[in-house]
Image (cartoon, helix red, strand yellow):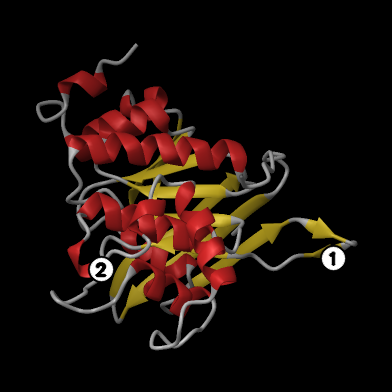
């Protein structure tokens, strides 16, 4: 079993005045966030609101304005932020002879996939997969995994380095109901047993309501943040999603 590290709630990630522009087009403007470890933070908004762009900016994958700071001191010095990331999907062609072990070993240990298995690496990978009830997938071909199975493998990869921040970009896209419920139970487990903060992009407002500690309504900038109850009952939420479209959420008590 993995050693449990209870989140202390003291570490935090601050996003200060983040902005992204492509030419004259403003994608994100003056985004400010304060994210604590041990919390699930759901980013919601309509298509084109800049949700995935926010993830890419935090990953430093695209040019952006502003700063992202990790507040955690070790031996009197600020530590560098370690980020784990699970994308919406990865493209693997059918019949690609790549096993789950090969995928994780190549990423985590930099092993060429044609080398013989390392028992030590195999034990570490299986241990990581166990957290997500995916240890039986270790020898399966990645191209033959279902959406939910692949998602659990990607989660295992993302947390093997014990990141401070885990970014999840619509990770349940294309996953069935049972897979979604397992995913959210797993995220709650990560929140309780790993010393990290989670930023989750999601369109599943029911699940966000049930599991998120904080909800962030984004439309180029942060329009509203707080509990699901506070955000769903806000005028900003009604303006973005419309009373007709989501009557159950704008009358929450």
Which residue matches tag 2? 141
Q: Which quadrant of the figure contains the C terminus?
A: top left
Q: Quadrant of residue 184?
A: top left
Q: Which is more N-terminal, label 1 or label 2?
A: 1
Q: Residues within 10 Å of mark 1 (few under 14, many from 20)?
A: few
SS of the residue under disc 2: loop
Q: Number of numbered discs present?
A: 2
Q: Mark 2 touching mark 1, by CB under 8 A?
A: no
Q: x and y percent of residue 15 in the render?
A: 56, 58
Q: CA distance from mark 2 to mark 1?
A: 43 Å
Q: Is residue 221 visible?
A: no
Residue at screen point 50% across, 72% down: 65
Q: Is residue 26 visible?
A: yes
The residue furthest left is: 244
Which residue matches tag 1? 77
Residue at screen point 41% across, 25% down: 230
Q: Quadrant of residue 24?
A: bottom left
Residue at screen point 55% across, 68% down: 66
Direction from residue 228 to residue 140 in the image, left or right: left
Q: x and y percent of residue 20 in the render?
A: 39, 70
Q: x and y percent of residue 51 in the render?
A: 33, 56
The residue furthest top is: 253
Residue at screen point 20% across, 69% down: 143
Q: x and y percent of residue 68 in the render?
A: 59, 64
Direction from residue 240 to residue 29 in the image, left or right: right
Between 81 and 109, the one nearer to me in the picture: 109
């Amino acid at each position: 079993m993995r050693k449990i590290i209870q989140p202390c709630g003291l570490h935090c990630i601050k996003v200060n005045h983040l902005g992204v522009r492509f030419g004259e087009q403003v994608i994100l403007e003056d985004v400010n966030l304060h994210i604590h470890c041990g919390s699930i933070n759901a980013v919601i908004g309509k298509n084109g609101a800049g949700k995935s762009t926010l993830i890419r900016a935090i990953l430093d994958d695209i040019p952006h304005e502003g700063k992202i700071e990790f507040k955690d001191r070790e031996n009197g010095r600020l530590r560098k932020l370690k980020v784990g990331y699970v994308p919406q999907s990865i493209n693997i062609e059918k019949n690609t002879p790549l096993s789950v072990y090969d995928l994780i070993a190549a990423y985590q240990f930099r092993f060429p996939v044609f080398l013989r298995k390392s028992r030590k690496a195999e034990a570490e990978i299986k241990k990581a997969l166990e957290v997500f009830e995916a240890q039986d997938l270790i020898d399966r071909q990645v191209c033959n995994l279902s959406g939910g199975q692949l998602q659990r493998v990607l989660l295992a990869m993302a947390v093997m380095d014990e990141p401070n921040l885990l970014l999840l970009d619509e990770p349940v896209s294309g996953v069935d109901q049972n897979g979604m419920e397992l995913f959210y139970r797993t995220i709650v487990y990560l929140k309780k047993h790993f010393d990290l903060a989670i930023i989750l992009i999601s369109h599943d407002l029911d699940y966000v309501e049930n599991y998120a500690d904080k909800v962030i309504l984004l439309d180029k900038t942060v329009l509203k943040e707080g509990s699901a109850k506070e955000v769903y009952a806000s005028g900003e939420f009604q303006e973005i999603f419309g009373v007709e479209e989501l009557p159950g959420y704008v009358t929450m008590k």
